Image (cartoon, helix red, strand yellow):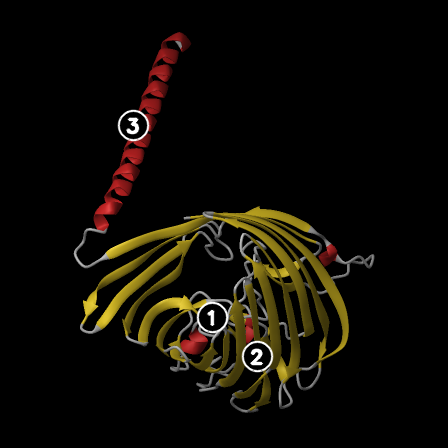
Amino acid sequence: MLASVLPNVSKIKRSLIEKYKNMCKRFVSFILVALSALPLLAQKEGFSYKIYGQVRNDLYFNSRQNNESVDGALLSFPKPKNLDPAGEDINGVSNLNFYNMHTRLGVDVTGPALGNWKTSAKVEFDFRGSSSTLGIVRMRHAYFQLANGGSSLLVGQTWHPLNNTVTTELMNLNVGAPYQPLGRAPQIHYQYQDQAVKFRAAMIWQAQVASMGPGNTRSREYLRNSKLPELFASFDVRHESSTLGLAVHYMSIAPRIKTDEGFKTDERVNSLTLEAHGRYQKDLLTISAKSFLSQNFNQANGLGGYGVTSTDPRTGKKEYAPLRISHSWLNIMYGKKWRGGAFLGYLKNLGATKQVSELVGVGTNVDQLATASAELTYNIPGWKFGVEYNYTTAWYGTPDHKGRVKNTYDVSNHRLVFGAMFMF
């Protein structure tokens, strides 16, 4: 009986293998047809397309546990001490990881004119996923843009405007966060630019990154329920190799629509962020710097939050005050084929202007942060190889009645990153 069954099993196995081969052939054929059709896209009347991307691999080492995201790829700052019964620091454990989720693919599109306005668009994605689902496709940029002379209007998702007034040049994927805002957001963004000045104004909503709210949970609802987008404006003056500018950002969130006692409420946390930036770029040298006085600006990988100033004893309705954070950075880069540089960042928690309790936010028990890093990259057409060393110290303590952190101690992290990118 067994002998009679074995030939049938063999036939079934061969059939399954044949079906698998045919499926693979059809899949490969589909990919080849899709790729061969790409050049035809450029033949659509009035449109042109440019496909670009990168394959990126990074290997990193940390000397201790850190506040981070993307499986450790996006470093923020060291975690505080967490002592076990024997007095050993549980967070004092080092780690090593290799990742390539920031491989990217995108397309730039130019289209037919819309009246007197030139039209263009960008769609770009990577494999970053989310904090719990790494390795899946994530939208980075998706917008269209209209341009007429010095004026342009961008509608869609791209970098938060406070991120790209002036940017850092770092191998580390945090690009200077939390000293430098890092995040993309849906927005309606107007810009006017000529040889001497640049003015920008934007209305911004939240999507992949959102503000922190009650229970230290992130949600887009806090901004959505306020019925007011984030508001941004900046003004730059440029002369020869130098750029200097100022920016302002206003945000009002509604952390709750119902109190714990069940009453409807229209509570708000209002915050104002001021920023100054500058850049000098000539030949092989680039010097960039930025300084902030931010309030409750934790939605772009930053620190900050707010506290309760008063509570109605009958309804439970609360009033709030934002925490103020001062953060600045300096980035110096030199070279072309061999390009090296350094980054310095400093952050200070200034607390609130009023007495607060029930603090909500990121790093509300952090008094100061300081970072120094150095990197060296080798750049040739299509390729970039580099190494970066990062040293970050965080001072932790206990918030006082105004949210200022006292009785501090410090912890430090040493981070070493090796990266390789193939760019096309």
Residue 280 is situated, as x and y percent measured from the top left of the image, at 54, 72
In the rendered view, tell whether residue 65 sits above or below residue 222.
Answer: above
Question: Residue 292's mark?
Answer: 2
Residue situated in front as seen by the camera: 371 or 324 = 371
Which residue: 34% across, 59% down? 123
Of the residues shown, which amino acid type is indicated by label 1?
A: Asn
Where disc 1 sits, the SS reads loop
Look at 77% across and 70% down and name the residue there: 409
Number of the front mark, 2 or 3: 2
Pointer 2 local density, CA inside 10 Å: few below 14, some 14–19, many at least 20: many
Residue occupying image coordinates x 54% and y 91%: 314
Say the numbered circle drawn on residue 114: none
Q: Which mark is residue 164?
A: 1
Frontmost of labels 1 and 3 is: 1
Kind of residue at disc 2: Phe
Q: Residue 302: which quarter of the image? A: bottom right
Residue shown at 76% from the left, 74% from the top: 408
Give the CA distance from mark 1 to mark 3: 49 Å
Q: Secondary structure at mark 3?
A: helix
Q: Which residue is mark 3?
A: 22
Q: Are marks 1 and 2 in contact (CB under 8 Å)?
A: no
C-alpha distance separating marks 2 and 3: 60 Å
The spot of residue 357 in percent (x, y) is 64, 83
**Marks 1 and 3, the one that precedes in the sequence:** 3
| One can see residue 213 in this view | no
